[in-house]
Amino acid sequence: MSGKGKNDELIDHIAKRLRNHAEPYREGAWERFAAQAEGRRRRGMAWSRWAAAAILVLAAGWFVFDLTDNERGNGARQVFKQQSAGQQLAVEERPDEDTAPVSPYKAQQVDSGETPDPVFDQSQTVRTALAVRSGQVVENREASATAKSAAPHMVASASASHSTDASTAGGAPIGRDASVGRDVEEIVGEQPIAADPMPAQPENHSRLAYESQGIHESVSEEAGKWDFAIALAPSVTSERLNLGGGVAVAYRLSDKISLASGVSLSDLGVAQQHTGQPSALKASLTPNSPAPGQESEIAHYRNREITSVSSTLLAVDIPLNLRYHVTDRFYTSAGVSFIGILKERRINHFVDHINQPTTDYAYNLKAVHSAERSGEQPLQGRGYTGFLNFSVGRSVPLSRKVFLAVEPYFKLPIGRLSNEDMDLTNGGVRIVTGF
Amino acid sequence: MSIRIRYLKKKHALSLEGAVRGCAQDGDNRCKEFIYKNCYGYVLAIILRYVKNDFDAEELTNESFIRAFNKIETFNSKEGGQRYEKSFRSWLARIAVNISIDFLRARKPLVALEDVSEQELTPHRVAVSTDLEVHDILKLLQQLPDIQRTIFNLYEVEGYSHEEVSALLSIPESTSRTYLTRAKKKLRQLYIESVDITAKL
């Protein structure tokens, strides 16, 4: 018993001495540790710094490009196409470099029997119509659309294709912010404007370049606060279930707030918006006769009628979101996306006017539906400051370095994208694996 | 202004609690340095109980601090003052123990090393006195097989239960008890042999 007691005493003594023991600090240990930790961090973060910097530069470049594009658009002149009674008026934007100086006060009247220039129709991008005659703005009778930024120096050129009668119409320069419409009965005069060359904005560019450089430098300094993730993002549009995915990067501004970006590729199936009749639909319907007044007559002679247009888009999406961490594992974010359409495939859906007889005894007629791939790709190759993003997410750590996050999100088209004839609103659940 | 205030704050002498909080808040390097220097000896001592080699022990100490600094925001204690520091040291000790066990496990299977025959245990001379010195204890301890030494440390020194030890080492609880008994027995034997050697000298 006493032996066991002595043994326990020995063990207790050993345990106690070990528990209270601390080695002395070895000189230079911290310096060695700091060098080791720094080396590891640099190795680990070298590639991610470059990736993050590239994404930021790309996003900034995209933004600058978009701004420049908008500026060009403002400097463009508008060409109005008008047709005779009950005809459609369309406004086309063309960049300065594409258009030769137009003789002022020139108006052309379109003979309704003539075929308009198909190229002109296809390049129609802004479905605004404005009619001016003798300085009077003819108001929209059908759907109205919101015009973009007002451009006081804008050429309003009524140029409809192959008209023979040209009449002059005087008046004040026309702003683009007028309410516009499609069907205008009046003939449109062409409004010349002082050829105001689009002023370059070096301040803007240099500022952005400076900001971009500033961001790049801060990335180098604070690379320790970057998070990286791979995301899979199934989404739902009005048309179908889509799949997308990409890489995401987030920079922690503080404990609660981080700035998130990334690049993702998504395959979106979209359909035409329900509000108004899309230009694509109209163009497909009446490729040879754009006059709205004659649509019924033309449709009478045509064998089929277009009912809807659907489109499949391959888009690259670069979001810029501000993320707020409500708790350690729960966060919410909001921001915008820059979207570029890489590929577009449109399909027109028709109903044939010649109904197919059914085999039943009632001699009922059945409508024949058909679909046809369209040659139009109005969105392809274009970039937009496109979506307003909203999401909430919950992350679950899988291991010490890897986490899994489930993030329901919703994307609302804004700006020019919301004016397109396709409904690009989509939402889904993003599954993110971070490390 | 806020930078100035922060700078002035840093001029004050740091406590371990302040350094931990500061490190968790903004990853401040000065706080890290304070924590490292303050806890270095404590962590190294823990690791030296498990690992025989000094060089490995220092490597693992640094590894422990790297892991601790990376996860320091997850350390959460509602206590304050001494209790906070004690809590932080326990947290740090747990990291050091886990890293040591990972190291031993990666080097060779722990259980395979258990069957060291009694003859292989060569007694070392230790300066035995009524107050056994730590370095002498470590010399005795290092003669134990890895698995026994680990279990002895976990149970007797760190205060883990057999259930926790079995979970940590992926062995049955009964095995943990057996190895602990063997470890104690061998330690006593080594101690007695050391006393004999010293007495003969």
Image (cartoon, coloured by chain):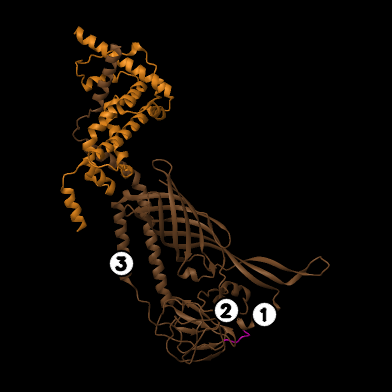
Chain colours: A brown, B orange
Q: Which mark is residue A117?
A: 2
* Amino acid found under the numbered disc labelled 1: Ile
Residue at 38% across / 19% down in the picture? B179
Q: Which residue bears the numbered disc 1?
A: A298
At x 54%, y 89%, the residue is: A187
How many numbered badges does the structure rendering display?
3
The chain that hosts pointer 3 is A
Mark 1 to mark 2: distance in Å?
18 Å
The image quarter in which residue B144 lies: top left
Distance (Cα) linking label 1 and label 3:
54 Å
Between residues A21 and A126, which one lies in front from this camera angle? A21
Chain bearing tag 2 is A
The residue drawn where x is 36% and y is 59% is A57
> Which mark is first along the chain, 2 or 1?
2
Please tell me if label 1 and label 3 are on a single chain. Answer: yes
Report the disc number at residue A359.
none
Q: Are there few (<14), some (14-19), or many (20+) residues within 10 Å of tag 3?
A: few
Residue B141: x percent and y percent? 29, 20
Q: Position of residue B114 (x, y in %)?
A: 39, 19
Q: Which residue is mark 3?
A: A206
Which range is magenta?
A110-114
Q: Residues within 10 Å of mark 2 (few under 14, many from 20)?
A: few
Q: Are marks 2 and 3 in contact (CB under 8 Å)?
A: no
Residue A316 visible in this rendered orientation of the protein: yes
Is A264 within the magenta?
no
Relative height, residue A234 to residue A184 (above, below): above
